[in-house]
Image: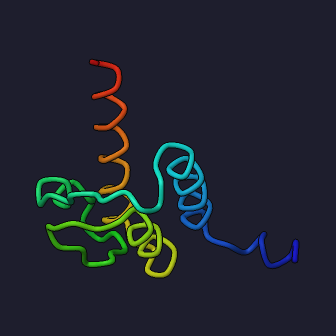
Amino acid sequence: MKAIISYLPSQVYQNFFSIEYALEKVSLEEVVAVKQEVLELVPEGSSLANLRSGEYTVKQLIQAMLVLSGNDAAYALGYYIAKKKLARAIH
């Protein structure tokens, strides 16, 4: 098993860390409104899940990050968590 893990691309580790952090902050059932302005922040050439503006559960975004290495899903989830954290800090 150790040999397999050593060959994983760094993007896989980044996704694992992002998912672990997300699961500490939100529940899988929460609904995330993904806006086009967030999707436009994803760097050109990134691996995408081809999300469109709309509503997704946290679980769906995590699945897109794992199965498709979707950076757009990672950006959408990160934006949602940051916005939620900021709202808590203000109130």
Q: How many marks?
A: 0
Looking at the rendering, in which quadrant would you find the C terminus? top left
Quadrant of the frame with the N terminus: bottom right
Query: Looking at this view, is 43 or 80 the one in front?
Result: 80
Q: Residue at x 55, y 47 (%)?
A: 21
- Left or right: residue 71 compared with residue 38: right
* Quadrant hosting residue 74: bottom left
- Determine the residue positioned at 27% across, 60% down: 43
Camera-side residue: 7 or 35? 35
Q: Is residue 67 above or below residue 17?
A: below
- Asked if residue 70 is positioned above or below residue 26 in the image, the reply reads below
> Is 43 placed left or right of 14 in the picture?
left
Q: Is residue 50 above or below residue 91?
A: below
Which quadrant would residue 71 be assigned to in this image? bottom left
* Residue at the image position 11 percent from the left and 60 percent from the top: 36
Q: Position of residue 63 (x, y in %)?
A: 46, 75
Residue 68 image point, x, y percent: 43, 80
In the current view of this chain or complex, which residue is farthest to the right?
2
Query: Foreground residue, 22 or 66?
Result: 22
Tell me which corner region of the image, top left, top right, bottom left or bottom right, holds residue 70: bottom left
**At 29% across and 71% down in the image, what residue appears?**
45
Colour scheme employed for the rendering of this structure: rainbow
Residue 51, percent from left and from top: 24, 74
Place of residue 57 in the rendered image (x, y in percent of width and height, measured from the top left): 35, 66
